[in-house]
Image (cartoon, helix red, strand yellow):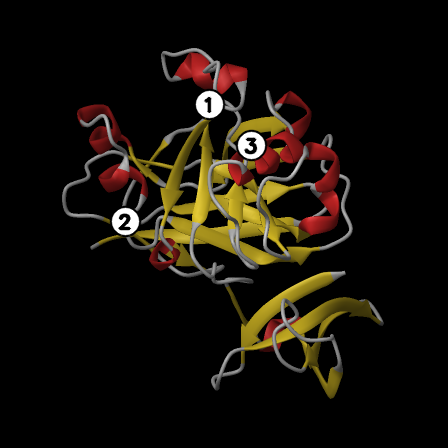
Amino acid sequence: MRIARFTTGEDPQYGIVQPKDGRDMVYAITGDPLYTEIRPTGTVLPLEDVRLLAPVIPRSKVVCVGRNYRAHAEEMGGEVPEQALFFLKPNTAVVGPGEPVAIPSYCQELSLEGELAVVMKTLVKDVEPEQVRSLILGYTIANDVTARDAQRGESQWFRAKAFDTSCPLGPWIETDLDVASLAIRSSVDGEPAQDGTTADMVRSVADLVSEISHATTLLPGDVVLTGTPAGVRTVAEGSTMSIEIEGIGTLTNPVVRR
């Protein structure tokens, strides 16, 4: 099931995206599927007639994982850490499909990082890996946009990773997906960049969520980014970034200068 958050020019609402007669349609539902039973409102709209929004606005945080693909760690001049490397993005960093990513004033080197994102369904604290799957609502696509020059210049990554618009999410949440071996590809203006697979993750989704939960409580709607494959590249003002993950779809965002 694909859960989308969308607008037709009025208040945001949720819907289920399903094909019908060769077209993708959005079946509007009542309330927020994180907290209420999914019930159709009776409104059905062609997907092309709505504007998709970020499928979730994390209730408290986005937890990100650094260097979870060995080849990416090597291209960044490092090794996979013995202990998982975690950092945070605030929910103010989140934007949806098609929304611009704004290069902050202090950045001259912006990079894309395509990632599988995990959306939590319930409160998660001190769980073991085998418990994780039942606690996940579903999966979406993330772009861990990074001010690379700021990242190199500081030991803390706040300026590099947490700026407004640095976390595009979308296009929807896919609830039924085996994430063990999914192709992840990214491109800039149609030119290929990353070409990887989740099978190359050093730590699995279950292991990551479990380890995070022993450090901090994950709330319903919180998002976990699982790391990026090799091939990250610089993105210039005026470019368009696209991230594609097998079984989910494509997330595309233009780049502008703040």
Q: Amino acid at mark 2?
A: Phe
- Image height check: is 68 above or below 166? above
Mark 2–mark 1 distance (CA, rounded to whole Å)? 20 Å
- The residue under the point 47% across, 19% down is 83
Depth order, front residue of 151/86: 86
Q: Nearer the viewer, residue 92 or 195?
A: 92
| CA distance for labels 3 and 1 | 15 Å
User: Looking at the image, do the residues carrying marks 2 and 1 touch, with CB atoms under 8 Å apart?
Assistant: no
Q: Which residue of the protein is positioned furthest toward the front in this rendering? A: 126
| Badge 3 vs badge 1, beta-carbon distance below 8 Å | no
Query: Where in the figure is residue 124, as x and y percent of width and height?
Result: 59, 49
Query: Can you tell which of label 3 and label 2 is closer to the viewer?
Result: 3
**Numbered mark located on residue 211 in the image:** 3
Residue 190: horizontal and vertical position, in percent?
50, 41
Instruction: Give the side of residue 246 with respect to residue 163, left or right.
Output: right
SS under mark 2: loop
Q: Earlier in the sequence, mark 2 or mark 1?
A: 1
**Secondary structure beneath disc 3?**
helix
Residue drawn at (59%, 55%), measured in percent from left and top? 123
- The residue labelled by disc 2 is 163
Disc 1, SS = loop
> At 69% from the left edge and 25% from the top edge, which residue is drawn?
199
**Residue drawn where x is 73% and y is 75% of the image:** 37
Which kind of residue does numbered mark 1 sit on?
Arg
Mark 2: few, some, or many residues within 10 Å (few <14, many ≥20)? many
Q: Earlier in the sequence, mark 3 or mark 1?
A: 1
Earlier-in-chain disc, 3 versus 2: 2
Q: Say which amino acid is labelled 3.
A: Glu
Residue occupying the far right of the picture = 21
- The quarter of the image holding the C terminus is bottom left
Residue at mark 1: 67
**Mark 3 surroundings within 10 Å by alpha-carbon count, few (fewer than 14), some (14 through 19), many (20 or more):** many
